[in-house]
Image: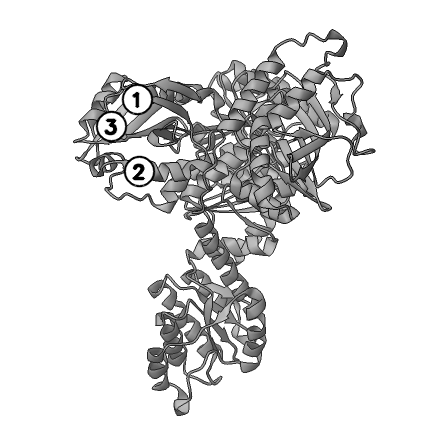
Amino acid sequence: MHPLHSFFYPQVIAVIGASDRYGSAGRTVFGQLLANLTASRIVPVNVNHKTIGGMKTYANLTEMAQEIIADIVIVILSADKIASIVREANKLNIKNIIIINDLEQPTPTIRNKLERAADIAQKAQMRLLTVPTFGVMNLFLQQNSTCAYIGQSVSIGDCLQHYAKGRGVQFSRFITLNPQKNDTISTGQIIDFVASESKNKAILVQINTLDNTRELISALTAAARHHTVFVLNTLPESNAENLLNQALERNHIFCVSTFTEFLTAAKLFHTHVSAQGRRIGIVSNTPQISALTLKSLPQMGLILAQPNTATQRGLVKFLPNKAAVTNPLYLPTDTVPSLFQAACEAFLQDEQIDAVCLIYVGTNISDSHCVAQIVGQLQTRYPRKPLLLTWLGSADNPEIQALFNQNKNLHFRQPENALDALVQLNRYREHRHTHQQNNPFYDYRAATQAATLWHEQLASPITDNANKPNPSQFFNVLDDALDGLQKHLRPLLPVSKSMMTQVFDALKLQPTKKSTDTECVMTWAHQPLFGQLITLTAHDKTVSLLPPLTPLILNNALNQLDLPHLIWQDWFLDAAEVLFRLPEITQLQVALHHDVKKGICGNDLKIQILHDTHWQNENVFTPYPFEYEEILTLKNGTTATIRPIRPEDATLITQHVAQLSERSRQMRFASQSAQLSPNLLVRLSQPDYQREFALLVHDEALRPLAMANYTADADRQSCEFGISLIDEMQGQGLGAILMTRLITRARQQGFVAMRAEILSENYPMQKLALKMGFTLAKHENDSTMIAANLIL
């Protein structure tokens, strides 16, 4: 069960600040909770009233606790009273609190009071969430739908709700938050919970505040693996908006750029329609409007399909005067309704047409209704192709709209909107294909050694006391080639030559004197909400990148900066790896250029060293767990490296699976195929170290010997593991070594249980599981499987 289950499924709700006063937030919230039948009991708490709404009212939680204990407390009071209520709730062992706050930008005074209450909740391990009045009224409401909405704006939520109501669109959950910095429940945790509910297949998310960026990205990544997820980024600051978009794109999370696209996404989710391509067939009884629609196709990237021969022969039999079959297919205004159905169905059956758009006008209400009814039913018979219905002028009326809503048809009031919907469907289809891209292999061993050496040098004392660096200050290493840029980085004390040597050796830089031929400036600095950033500036262009870098991400950046890959790629990958492995390096800036004889050269290096590394917890992506890197000697004398998997290891993972025997592949992947599916390869090579863990073992020649991983279950309380070894590594003790590290990491991440489903004939794996303390039992639903479970 998910940790937030009790929060969203309360039996008893206490409403502190409930009221009978007309127009008050207390009356609005209390009345709506009662109307929605939110819980078995909804209890008003107000020190100034004996009854509210005819119900007994308690002065405080302590008085209420003498008769009944609340599962959750909703507070509708001024900010200065919230901290004391949180303390009282904690004494009564009430662990769930909702604070009503309608201010999107609270004043500093109010913010301090909210943060004080959140700090108390944090120390008491209470769940505290801030929502607006609009949000709490829908927070617990559930409807019969497979699409959920989670947003952070009252105005956007209200518009979406109004849009959905007019089109018969429902949401399984409609959650509007007003997240504050120290709330103990983050937006990411809410997304996790909604994704864990089995009924939800699609999630719409709107973001305008970052309360915990790492948790948000991790939750969206996990949700997008099993659900259709659309994100609308409305962060007010452009740099933050761009960085969030970068993080979302990197983790293959689909973003929409306009509110119109967001509204259209709600309609698309409701109808469960998907796209197969960009070839469109148009049926219309208005040539003039169709001609205008055709002009929009090229700029939208859509293609006017060519009906196949069978379609043309079939339709000729029905068309008046045996007219030629064309696309768009024009039918007279007085055409009988059944002919519209026949024409649309013929196009839907045509394999050369990916979507069908019907543009209909007419003043005959009876015919309009009949066409809408019989054509609308085609979508259920051909669910794999979008049927886009556009009723115009007098043909469009409330009865037609209601009919389309009932049939869950994609209907629009302008043809261009229908085309936009098809474009969006195809963008998502193409996005799903890009999800299967994998990074090429890159060997970071040289960068690892350089970072390790530099770390040891930074930890050792510097004997040159006169020039000993002050860790709270910036150090100027070379001449000031970038005069006037970032003057605050200039140091107060000179730096010893030993420090200068350390920097250039670690980064594989050749020092040069003051130069004017700078090709690129690299900056490593901390940015609030996102952690460390690598910023590259070249040719008057700037690109900011979230570490750790990968070859694909860096290649895109080099293309934007017009820098040659052959010269710069390896150096940037190694330099970024060194910096990411050294949290002591909080800021660094260097001017770079390439010399044909010397390689990459640098000057005007500025650096800040701080040994307090708590800032790394703010990085968007969970730091690569370097501490699990290890070189070990196996029983047969083989020297092997064990390390966490990174995206560049997709090639090694593919090689490892190919080297397994057919039986080993069957035991691990329930398939004898020597090739992993693209989606599975992405999952294995791109673990989210916020909630997952994966290890790879290879020899000195980079030959993969074994791999192991676990992934979090939907409830975030348990995880499922898997291990595979090439046959010659069986009996070398490697399986136990990998399992020990998986178990250790899982405990560190807070999992309470680890499990696996093992084939009944996989006796070596069952033996290893027993050795590691697992209990084995027959699988409840599959007689060919054994369920292995370990309480952590």
Residue at (70% x, 22% y) in the render: 608
> Percent from the top left, x then y, of residue 167?
50, 58
Cα distance in 3D space between marks 1 and 3: 11 Å
| Front in this rendered view, residue 729 or 711 | 729
Q: Earlier in the sequence, mark 2 or mark 3?
A: 2
Cα distance in 3D space between marks 2 and 3: 14 Å
Characterize the local packing of mark 3: few (<14), some (14-19) or many (20 or more) Cα atoms within 10 angstroms: few
Residue at (56% x, 73% y) in the render: 293
Residue at (79% x, 24% y) in the render: 490
Q: Earlier in the sequence, mark 2 or mark 1?
A: 2
Q: Are marks 2 and 1 in contact (CB under 8 Å)?
A: no
Please give the residue where the numbered disc 2 appears in the rendered image.
657
> Percent from the top left, x then y, of residue 421?
51, 61
The amino acid type found where label 3 is placed reads Glu
Cα distance in 3D space between marks 2 and 1: 17 Å
The residue lying furthest to the front in this view is 597
Q: Secondary structure at mark 2?
A: helix
- The label number, if any, that marks residue 734 in the structure image: 1
> Percent from the top left, x then y, of residue 29?
58, 36
| Front in this rendered view, residue 104 or 290 | 290
Q: Are marks 2 and 3 in contact (CB under 8 Å)?
A: no
Taking 600 as reference, is 139 left or right?
left
